[in-house]
Amino acid sequence: MKALFIFIGLIFSFQIHAHDLKKITEKLLSQMKNGTPIEAKSASIYLTEISQFHDDADVNILILKARAAISNPDLSRIEAYETALSFYEEANAIDPDYLYALDRASLMLFLLKFYSEAQLSSMECLAINPNYYPCIYGMAHIYMAMGMKKEALIFFKTALEMFPSNTSINSFITSIQGKIQQEKVQKQRMSL
């Protein structure tokens, strides 16, 4: 609990000026693309953490409540995701352009298996910033869950361009390409 209060204190006391944030973000994106796998993973984590900070204290509190709901052992997974979703949606109501909350709402919808709604939330996020990596990666998984392999492949390839050292993305791409190839072969056999 003490750590939570320290974290809340950091959120309220930690302010990055927009100019500094842009420089930091550019450096981290470069490190994701050109760094070693460990540097790239660290940069990805830092980017995610930076994207969570908001200049509205109420939004930050809602994000913390959503995180607390997800880790609440007294809630079932479904209840935790639904509760977190309500907090992320409330944060989005305060700031509809807040990418982190849009992406996390999309993730909760995905985990609840509301794939069409998750897709819409991610599309909103990408309309604001088409280069927001967490949302690009999330869209790939949403399309996979929806059975839309070609669309998923496009998003995984985009994610790989942004984060070339992420070996799991390569695995997804290889798997999807294999499935698409199998489907082609099956169609050819059926047409004979």
Image: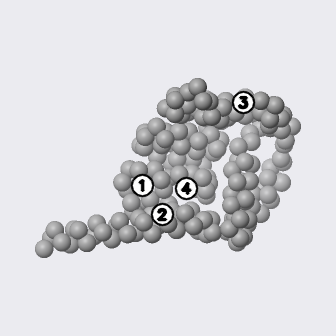
Q: Seen in the image, is 93 located left or right of residue 148?
A: right
According to the picture, the residue beneath numbered tag 2 turns out to be: 172
* Residue that extends furthest to the right in the rendered view of this protein: 13
Q: Work out whether 120 lies above or below 183.
A: above
Which type of secondary structure does the marked residue at label 1 adopt? helix
Q: Amino acid at mark 1?
A: Met
Q: Nearer the viewer, mark 4 or mark 2?
A: 2
Tell me, for residue 144, which label it has, or none.
1
Placement of the N terminus among the 4 image quadrants: top right
Q: Are marks 1 and 2 in contact (CB under 8 Å)?
A: yes
Q: Tag 2: Cα neighbours inside 10 Å, few (<14), some, or many (≥20)?
A: some
Tell me, for residue 162, which label it has, or none.
none
Q: Nearer the viewer, mark 1 or mark 2?
A: 2
Q: Tag 3: Cα neighbours inside 10 Å, few (<14), some, or many (≥20)?
A: some
Sequence-wise, the earlier of marks 1 and 4 is 4
Q: Position of residue 76 (x, y in %)?
A: 52, 29
Sequence-wise, the earlier of marks 1 and 2 is 1
According to the picture, the residue beneath numbered tag 3 turns out to be: 61
Placement of the C terminus among the 4 image quadrants: bottom left
